[in-house]
Image: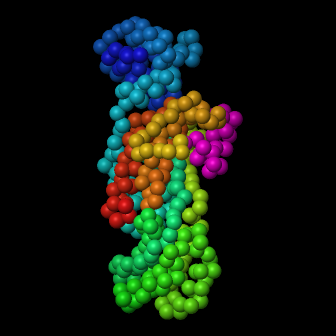
Amino acid sequence: MELSERQRRILESIIKDYVSTAEPVGSRAVVKKHGLKISAATVRNEMADLEEMGYLEQPHTSAGRIPSEEGFRYYVDFMMEKEKLSDEELGLLHEALDDNMQEWSDVVQRVGHFLSQVTNYASFVIVPSIKLSQFHSLQIIPMQEGQAIVLVVTDIGIILHRRITIPPTMQLDELRKIGDLFNHALRGKSLQEIKRSDLKVLRDEIRYRRQVIDKALEAIDNLLDHSQDDQVVITGALNIIKEPEFKDLDKLHKVLTIFEEDRQIKDILPDQIGKDVTIRIGRENKLEDIKEMSLVFAGYNTVGEMGKMGVIGPVRMEYWKAAGTVESVSLIIDQMLKSRGLK
């Protein structure tokens, strides 16, 4: 149902105050805090109409109103503007995603921490399993003195890059020869076919520049460990404890149980996801234990497939901040991968 401009302003005022205080909002507070040039009596009449439409609820007869889930949904769909990250927050994110990261798992950990820190909700980042067909090549690219990057390349492109230490005197030609040894042994095999025995043969046969070889083997070994299953990283789960909605220990236990099992987090999200931010409010969530929570999530590009990330918090959520943060992080990850030639 279309709301008048005055009704929209009143609904927005109540949502902002309720999200901030977790207390019902009265008509006088709406007039006083938000500078509406109408009487409290007029606001009360409009609030009664909004309640009849299903956008507000009155917890107690003498209390003010709170937004219903339908009220939050109307606001999100027709009124909300995503809040952009501040310059300070952008600086923190770029600092977190600096060039000193060893591998993709570092990105995941830091993104999760940033989402949780900025929104004050629990965050989740899901890294898709690496679905590959064939190993194509391994390259060792020198960086500054004493450091190089190991790149594992498959038919879908680069799926792992890790910074390693190398002897300061090692030359580019030597690194190329080491890469050729790996490529001769592994090219044409799928990651599923590469066995630890293959890596052991390489270790046993190659004595030349043992330190660099061991680092490269370690990189591939790590990739084999993480190529089969989606990885779920949850950060800031204890932020939920701060919310007044979850002072009830039974409610809190249900929510924290969700964070204990990767499968549950995966199950509450759609299988296919795009890069646009999606918001699910309260009962819109299918899982019973999460019907008093809201999710804000989006897809993000990885070095293989689309990953998923977002935040989970109470229905009384700063949707504008959560949505803006998730959207910004997704875009910055995309830019980071492009700048490093990983897309």
Magenta span dominant secondary structure: helix
Residue 96 at what x, y percent from top left? 41, 59
The residue drawn where x is 42% and y is 30% is 76
Front-lying residue, 113 or 125: 125
Residue 91 part of the magenta-drawn span? no
The magenta region covers 245-269
Vertical placement of residue 154 versus 211, above or below: above
> Is residue 151 among what the camera can see?
yes
Q: Is residue 341 above or below residue 37?
A: below
In this picture, residue 238 sits left or right of residue 187: right
Q: In the displayed orientation, state which residue is furthest to the front.
A: 188
Residue at (47% x, 18% y) in the render: 55
Task: Give the percent coordinates (x, y) of residue 270.
Answer: 53, 42
Q: Where does residue 185 sit, x and y in percent of width and height?
A: 52, 82
Q: Residue furthest bottom?
A: 207
| Quarter that holds the C terminus | bottom left
Q: Is residue 322 above or below residue 196?
A: above
Q: How is the image coloured?
A: rainbow
**Residue at point 57%, 86% (across, down):** 203
Q: Is residue 255 magenta?
A: yes
Among the 4 quarters of the image, the one containing residue 247 = top right
Q: Where's the N terminus, which quadrant?
A: top left
Foreground residue among 339 and 4 = 339
**Which of these two is toward me, 111 or 340?**
340
When asked about the image quadrant of residue 37, the answer is: top left
